[in-house]
Every structure is written in C-alpha cells, then in structure tokens.
C-alpha cells in the first residue's frame, strides 16, 4: 500500500474513529423508519468517499486533480497551505496526492466529503464518469463476456487441462522466419518437423500484456502468430475468461475481444460505433476508449479478414467518432493514429501477420504446437481404452507424417476421431496410410453420422445420398473460397453454393462446418483449413471430369480445357507457380484421390476411376521432378518441388522415394543424386524418422548437390557431412546456411574434408550471427593457424557453441594462442579438442594461462601435441587454480617423470578434475610413486589412464598400495607397462579392500 493509503487507513482505525465514521456506525443501529438525523446527513458524503476511494485513486488524473483542488478552494474547504500540501504529498504521485486530499477532507467532515462528492457527480469528464460507473460497467461487461464464451464452441474441448493453449504458454520471438512468411501452414510444420524454432524464451499467458523487465513498459501492440488450428482463438478465449475471473491483468479495466470475421460484414464504421455494435451493453463507448482507464482491444484471426491491410496508402484517422472503411480503421488503430492509449492484441497465421510492419509491433509471440509427448498425453485422454490407444499410437509411430500433422492440436483431434471410429467400426481396409485416406474417412464418417436413420440399419443408398447432399455443396463452397483466400462465409455464401443450412447446422455438419455467432454477424468456417482443402479437392476431382473451362478462372469464359488430365495438369501448374504454396495441400489431396483406397470411402461422391489415371498421374508427377538419370545438382530444390514428392506419396507412387530412402539408409547415395533424386532426398529430410535425430549425408555430396539441397538442410538438427571432399567454396554455401534466420542446425560434423583457411573464414562469419549451433566438428581438415584465428575471433562473440573439434588441422602454436585468447572471454565453450596440432610447450603455456581464469571449459583434449614436460608443468600449475575442468587428455605427449611429478602435485589440491588421460607417455617409476601419493589424498579423480608407459612392477605396486586407500577412482588402465607377477599380486590384494574400482 502507498504511504498516502496507510495514512488514510490510519484515520479509519477503530481506536481513532472520526466523527462521520462514528455517526455511520451509530446509524446502523438506529431506527430505519425515522427521519434522517443531522449525523445521518453529515455521514452521507463521507460514506460516498469511502466507497469510491479506489476509483478516486485510480482514475484521477493530474488535470482532474487540479480542477478538484480549485473547486474546493472556491468552496473555502482548502487553504493555500492545504493545496501545497496535497501537491507535494506522497512524492508527487497523483494516487498519493489523492490520498493526502482525502485525509484532509476526512478531518473536515461533513462539508469536505460532501463537496468532493458533489463536484464529481456534477462533472461530465471521463475521469468523473469512470469514478462513478467503472465498477458496475466492468462487472456487467465481464458477465456478458462469460455468457458468450460459455456458448462458443471450442475445437479443443476434449483436450486435458495440461494441453490447453494457456497451459502451453507462448514463445517470444524476434521476427518471422522466411518459412513462416512464405509457406503454407502444413509445409511449415512438415519442413520444421513440428519442432518450431529453438532457443526461444517462453512467456506465460498472464504476462502477455505486462512489462518483461522492471525498466520496460507494457506493449501497446502485441501480435501472436501460429499455423491454422494451433490454438490462437482458444488462447484468446482462455485469456478473456481468466480476465473476467480476475486472474490476469487486473490493471486492465476493459477487454474488448473482436474477431476479424465479424468485421467482414462491415463497410464503414467508427471506433465508437464498432464497440457499440459488438458490445451493446456498454452504454458509453467513448468512456471505454478514452484512455482514462486501460483498455485492451483484441483482434483475432487477421487471416480471416476479407480486406488486405495497406499501411502505405491508408487514410489517416484520429477521431474515434469518424466513420472510415473498416480496413482503414484497423490500420489506424495499429499505427496508433486512432486510440493511441488503447492496448491492441492481434492474432494471425504468420503469412498474413507479415503484412504488419515490424516497427509497429511491440511484442511478437508464437503459439507452440504439440510435442510427441503431448500427442501421447492427448491420445490417452481422448481414448481411455488402453488397447485402442495402443493401436493408434503404434500407427502414428509407423506413419511419421501423421504424427507430425498431429502436432497441430486441431488436426490431432481429427486424427484421433477418425482412427477411433475406424477401429470401433472394424474397417476391413485397415487404418489410413496417407493424409488423403485419413480425411476421406473423416468426411465419410461425418456424412454417415448425418444420414437419416430408421429402425433398421442404413442402406448403402442412404449413405451415398447423404454424402452427395452434404459433401458436394460443401466442396463447391470450399474450392471457390480457397482460390479467393476466403475462409469464413455468411449464410448468403452458403445458399449461393447450394449448401443446405439445416444440414450445415446439424450435429454431423458441425464437425465439418462450424457456426460462429456474435452481436455483429453470423459466420461459418470449416473445422480446419485442411478440411476445406480436402473438400475443395473432392469438388475439383469431380468437376474436372466434365468441366470444359478452367475451374480456377473467376470469369465465365476461359480457354477450353477438356478431360481430367488437362485439369489435373492445370492444378499442378498453378500450384508450382504460387510462391506461397497456397495450393500445395489441395494438389496433394487431388493426387491422393486417384488412389483407390482413398477414393473408396467417398465412392458415391468422387466415383470410381480405373487405375490408368493413377498410373498416368504418377508418371506425370515424376516427370516434373526431372529425369532420374540426369546430371547432379542444379538450382536449389524449392518447396514447390518437394510438394510434388508429397503428391507422389499421397498417390502411393513411391518407387523413387523408396529407392532413395534405401540408398540413404545403406549409405550408398554417392554418385546417384540426379535432380529427381535430390528432390526425393529433400522430401525424405522432412519425413524420414532416420533423418529426424541425425541426417547422415557423408561421402555422397559435392558442391552442386549441397547447393541443390541447401534450403532443406536448414531444418536438420544434426548434420553429418563427413568425407565429402568439401573445399572452401562449399563452406561459403554452408556459411550462408548457418547464417540464415531459419537455421535449425544444432550439430554439424565436417570431418575428413579439405577445408582450408578461406573455408574457416566463411564459417567464422556465420558463427558471428548463428544462435543455434552448439557443436562443430572440423577434425582432419587443413584450416591451419590462419583459419584458427578467423574462427577464434568469431568464438569471442558467439554465445551458442559449446563444443568444437580442431583435431588434426595443423593450427600449431600460433593458432593455439588465438584459441587461448578465446578462453579468456568466452563463457559458453565447454569442450575443446586440439589433438594432433603440434602446438608444443609454448601453446600449452598459453592455454594454461587462460585456464587459470576460465570458468566454463570442462573438457580439454591435447593429445599428440609434443607438449613435453614443459607443457605438462604449465598445465599442472593451471590445475592448481582452475575449478571447472573435469577431463584432461594428454596422450602421446612425451611426458616423463618430471612432468608427471608436477601433475601429481596439482592433484593433491585440485578437487575438480575427474578424468586424466596419460596414455603412451614416458612416465617411469618415480612418476608412478608420485601418482600413488596423490591418489591417497585426491578424492575427485574417477578415471586414470596410464596405459603404455614405463611403470614396471615397482611403479604399479606403488599405485596398488594407493588403491587400497583411495575410494573415488572407478576406472584405472595400466596395460602395456612391463608388469610382472609381483605387481599383479599387489593389485589383487588392493582390490580386496577397494569397493569403488570397477574397471582395471
């Protein structure tokens, strides 16, 4: 509580009741039927002040306070000194100044409180109206919103609470990726394998409109993106519900949720009239939008807006009473020209969100999809029958594309509903193996549910009639809506396309076409974008058999197109020409409907085709990929070409895909990557389970094929590109890959290539901006000292890489000095491998100096580097001060007893090092004795490797004596040390008392 608040509360203490409070207390015990006494009249104004205390504090502005003080001065209830006291009170915060004023007026009851009440009630300002009516307006508004939300249908009504949009929270993003801006929603999920971007900060829904730090301010414009069906609308509804229940954003007085589909029915409207139309219970919109109280305006579903926002040519408007076109109204609100004090929250699919200039958005968030574990949780919640749930899960595991689609919550429910229905029905054809089969069964299931039923089971004719009556008109509506980018429809649209309204509003139709109702408009939308696309494909499939003109043409006349094959070609051509992939899923379904197993559930609607069309379509699609025996490489494989491979999968024409997958699994891709094979490989990079955790493209790529596959390599988390004879020009390509904003690569191995210093320079430029790569393996290349310097400069700035391998790169002492400088400033690198680089004692000394201050590195590999005793001694001195290094590898470094003595001296004080590798050195009996003495005192070392030294019996016996005392060492290697019977017996005796050692 503020200081003024405490002062005011003190005046109301029981032991120090002021006159008006004691009178009010007495009034509660007086005869209510008698005439009001003087004390009653005196208490009235004071009670009013007490009841409106919070509102007075919250809504009184500096200008309103000045007018209030002036009025009280005129009424001679405040002196100049009193006015100065108020203005100086409470550190000059308006809220505390109001408390000081109330304290003064309380001591001058009844005239002071009465005058204040009269002033507020007679004022026509926004502040006064809020003080008088705010609480009642808010309570009524919250009640109305809760009633609306209770009647709205949420597609995720069957999800457990742990998987609700609010529970999953949001992800803070710093911009939209190219994939999000340019590609179809399903292609985004397929390409990124449902994982989304990594290393993003999570944000609880309750903090959406709050400052992120103590010094930052609340966002004015927040934008939340996500693919269709991810849960954006559900998130809005949950936020509004929690606000109505006063669980979030208590400082917001009014939340005004609007959907863009509601605005589609309006042409010209003012801001105040829009609020009046959408919320008729708010009698004074000007008060809500005035800025005197905090208001949040929500615009949900920008992708459903019929108008395209134009921020360059929109007419400027700053008057909330002025009527303008609805698109100009939204644009001016976002810009801040109109309602600048009102907070705005927009939701949208990402491609449409890209239309809003980045500079106008204060906070960008993304709704995350399900993970595999979330799908598993949803499955067992939705299908409590263990056997059924097990069958469904096994099917999803064996058909990964269905699993990836299930990362979209709305699609997940479609998948679960359909698979459960088929299992309960006992489908003779088994469970669907393609997306087309899945949606065919889903639509057939809902058409069957809506067929008229009598006492006897339905006949085939009834089911077929229901399919034609319901799905035929819906397909027409879906197709013409899709080509016009229209996703919500009015009743007039339904009638125009022959949709039977009672059927559309029935329980069976509601699973396909959802009815939305608001105070402004009644709209219909398909249950999910993919449902609209599938029904559109069924319409095109049926219509193309008899249409004589281009079905995509909006005009009545176009060039004649006769026959299904011409229309099929036309659809594929339009899909390939659409850079945004708007028709990708439509043509997938169109190809899939040529498969007999997909067409069978909807035979009454799509008819039966002979297999000749399927064979023809397979050959046509494969011809678009290019020849299978052509030259390698070419231009980068686009996602439009990858979509052709998806079409082949839906068509079940998978010979090419299977051949490439077999070669990928067996490692025999080398020399076989023609253009069509590259497209098939790009497809497999998205859908193959083998590629999800690790993409092994070793010994099969060259410059041309890397260039060809580059856009798809962006989304591989672990890339193995070993032994491909890459030169520096390939590193330029991979540098652009790692620099891309969409890059998801976390580990990359470039071992056994021919990368020189120029290639290292290209990689270093990428590391300056990359934020995803955590492990880089460059062993057995030729980057040299110069290349090491380039990379070292980048590592000083990079905050993501934790492991790097320079083994066998001839970086020498000069390159090691550059890496030692990295260890002085880098706080992220934990593993550094410089094996076999001839760094010598000088390089070891520079690393040792850096280790004295470095607090991040945990593993250092310096094997085969000619360190000698000088290098070992320098490292030993560093171990005395270092408290983070856990593993040190010094194999094959010509270390003798002198270097060993220095190391063992440091082990007596160092209690952090857990693994020490001294294989293949020249450690003799003296060194062994010193190690034995150190082991008696050291309690941290777990692994010690002294293989292939010169310990002999005497040295091993000394170590055996230490083992009898040491209880921390778990692994000890003493092979090839000229050990005889005496040492063996000593070791055996030591093991009788040692309980920790498990590997000797």
Image (cartoon, rainbow, N blue to C red):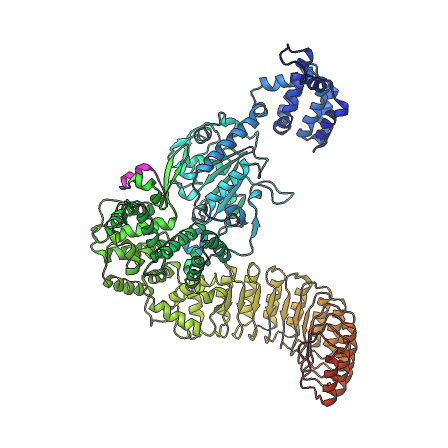
User: At which x and y percent is residue 766?
Assistant: 54, 62
Above-or-below relation of 91 to 527 = above
Quadrant of image for the N terminus: top right
Above-or-below relation of 561 to 490 = below
Q: What residue is rendered at 73% in x and 18% in y?
A: 19
User: At which x and y percent is residue 71?
Assistant: 65, 17
Asked whether residue 71 appears in the rendered view, the answer is: no
Quadrant of image for the C terminus: bottom right
Which quadrant would residue 962 be assigned to in this image? bottom right
Q: What residue is rendered at 72% in x and 28% in y?
A: 9
Q: From which residue to which does the magenta span run? A: 487-499
In this rendered view, identify the residue nearer to me: 973 or 175: 973
User: At which x and y percent is residue 834?
Assistant: 63, 73
Which quadrant would residue 909 be assigned to in this image? bottom right
Asked whether residue 588 appears in the rendered view, the answer is: yes
Residue 84 is left or right of residue 627, and the answer is: right
In this rendered view, identify the residue nearer to me: 221 or 251: 251
User: At which x and y percent is residue 84?
Assistant: 73, 23
- Is 488 included in the stretch rendered in magenta? yes
């Amino acid at each position: 509580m503020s200081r003024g608040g405490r002062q005011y509360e003190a005046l109301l203490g029981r032991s120090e009741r002021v006159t008006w409070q004691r009178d009010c207390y007495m009034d509660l015990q007086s005869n209510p039927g008698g005439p009001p006494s003087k004390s009653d009249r005196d208490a009235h104004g004071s009670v009013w002040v007490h009841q409106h205390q919070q509102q007075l504090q919250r809504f009184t502005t500096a200008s309103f306070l000045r007018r209030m003080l002036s009025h009280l001065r005129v009424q001679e209830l405040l002196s100049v000194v009193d006015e100065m006291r108020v203005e100086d009170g409470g550190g000059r915060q308006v809220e505390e100044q109001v408390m000081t004023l109330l304290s003064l007026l309380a001591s001058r009851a009844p005239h002071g409180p009465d005058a204040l009440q009269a002033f507020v009630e007679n004022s026509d300002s926004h502040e006064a109206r809020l003080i008088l009516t705010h609480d009642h307006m808010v309570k009524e508004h919250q009640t109305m919103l809760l009633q609306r939300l209770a009647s709205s249908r949420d597609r995720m009504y069957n999800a457990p609470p742990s998987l609700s949009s609010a529970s999953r929270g949001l992800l803070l993003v710093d911009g939209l990726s190219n994939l999000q801006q340019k590609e179809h929603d399903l292609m985004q999920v397929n390409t990124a394998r449902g994982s989304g971007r990594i290393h993003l900060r999570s944000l609880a829904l309750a903090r959406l409109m709050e400052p992120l730090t103590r010094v930052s301010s609340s966002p004015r414009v927040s934008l939340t993106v996500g693919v269709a069906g991810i849960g954006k609308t559900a998130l809005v509804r949950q936020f509004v519900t929690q606000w109505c229940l006063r669980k979030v954003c208590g400082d917001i007085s009014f939340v005004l949720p609007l959907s863009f589909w509601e605005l589609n029915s309006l042409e010209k409207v003012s801001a105040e009239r829009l609020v009046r139309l959408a919320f008729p219970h708010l009698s004074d919109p000007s008060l809500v939008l005035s800025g005197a109280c905090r208001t949040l305006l929500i615009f949900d579903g920008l992708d459903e807006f019929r108008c395209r926002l134009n921020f360059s040519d929109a007419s400027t408007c700053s008057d909330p009473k002025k009527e303008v076109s609805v698109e100009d109204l939204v644009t001016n609100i976002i810009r801040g020209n109109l309602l600048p004090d009102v907070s705005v929250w927009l939701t949208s699919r990402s491609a449409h969100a890209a239309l809003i200039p980045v500079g106008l958005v204060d906070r960008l968030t993304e709704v995350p999809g399900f993970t595999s574990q979330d799908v598993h949780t949803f499955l067992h919640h939705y299908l409590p029958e263990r056997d059924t749930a097990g069958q469904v899960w096994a099917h999803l595991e064996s058909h990964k594309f269905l699993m990836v689609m299930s990362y979209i919550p709305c699609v997940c429910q479609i998948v679960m509903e359909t698979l459960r229905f088929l299992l309960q029905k006992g489908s003779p054809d088994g469970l669907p193996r393609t997306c087309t089969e899945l949606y065919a069964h889903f639509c057939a299931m809902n058409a069957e549910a809506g067929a008229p039923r009598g006492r006897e089971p339905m006949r085939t004719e009834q089911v077929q009639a229901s399919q034609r009556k319901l799905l035929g008109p819906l397909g027409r509506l879906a197709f013409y809506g899709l080509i016009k980018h229209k996703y919500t429809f009015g009743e007039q649209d339904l009638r125009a396309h022959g949709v039977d309204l009672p059927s559309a509003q029935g329980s069976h139709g509601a699973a396909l076409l959802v009815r939305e109702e608001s105070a402004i408009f009644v709209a219909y939308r398909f249950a999910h974008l993919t449902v609209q696309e599938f029904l559109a494909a069924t319409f095109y499939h049926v219509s193309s058999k008899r249409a004589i003109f281009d079905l995509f043409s909006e005009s009545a006349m176009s060039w004649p197109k006769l026959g299904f094959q011409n229309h099929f070609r036309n659809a594929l051509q339009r899909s390939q020409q659409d850079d945004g992939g708007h028709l990708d899923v439509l043509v997938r379904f169109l190809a899939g409907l040529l498969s007999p197993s997909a067409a069978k559930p909807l035979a009454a609607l799509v008819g039966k085709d002979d297999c000749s069309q399927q064979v023809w379509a397979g050959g046509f699609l494969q011809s678009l990929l290019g020849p299978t025996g052509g030259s390698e490489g070419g231009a980068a494989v686009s996602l439009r070409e990858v979509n052709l491979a998806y079409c082949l999968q839906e068509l079940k024409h998978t010979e090419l895909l299977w051949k490439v997958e077999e070669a990928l699994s067996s490692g025999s891709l080398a020399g076989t990557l023609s253009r069509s094979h590259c497209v098939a490989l790009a497809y497999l990079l998205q859908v193959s389970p083998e590629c999800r955790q690790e993409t092994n493209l070793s010994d099969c790529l060259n410059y041309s094929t890397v260039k060809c596959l580059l856009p798809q390599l962006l989304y591989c988390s672990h890339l193995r590109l070993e032994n491909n004879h890459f030169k520096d020009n390939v590193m330029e390509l991979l540098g652009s890959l790692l620099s891309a904003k969409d890059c998801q690569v976390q580990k990359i191995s470039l071992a056994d290539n021919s990368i020189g210093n120029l290639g290292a320079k290209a990689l270093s430029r990428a590391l300056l901006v990359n934020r995803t790569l955590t492990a880089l393996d460059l062993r057995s290349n030729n980057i040299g000292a110069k290349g090491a310097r380039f990379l070292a400069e980048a590592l000083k700035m990079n905050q993501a890489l934790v492991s790097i391998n320079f083994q066998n790169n001839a970086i020498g002492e000069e390159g090691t000095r550059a890496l030692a400088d990295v260890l002085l400033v880098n706080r992220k690198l934990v593993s550094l491998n410089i094996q076999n680089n001839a760094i010598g004692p000088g390089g070891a000394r520079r690393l040792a100096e850096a280790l004295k201050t470095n607090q991040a590195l945990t593993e250092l590999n310096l094997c085969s580097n000619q360190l000698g005793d000088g290098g070992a001694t320098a490292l030993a001195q560093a171990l005395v001060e270092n408290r983070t290094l856990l593993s040190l590898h010094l194999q094959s470094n010509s270390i003798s007893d002198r270097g060993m003595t220095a190391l063992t001296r440091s082990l007596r004080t160092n209690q952090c090092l857990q693994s020490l590798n001294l294989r293949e050195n020249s450690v003799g009996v003296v060194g062994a004795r010193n190690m034995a003495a150190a082991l008696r005192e050291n309690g941290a070392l777990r692994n010690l490797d002294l293989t292939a030294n010169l310990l002999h019996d005497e040295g091993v016996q000394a170590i055996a004596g230490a083992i009898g005392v040491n209880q921390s060492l778990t692994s000890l290697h003493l092979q090839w040390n000229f050990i005889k019977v005496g040492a063996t017996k000593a070791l055996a005796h030591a093991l009788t008392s040692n309980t920790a050692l498990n590997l000797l």
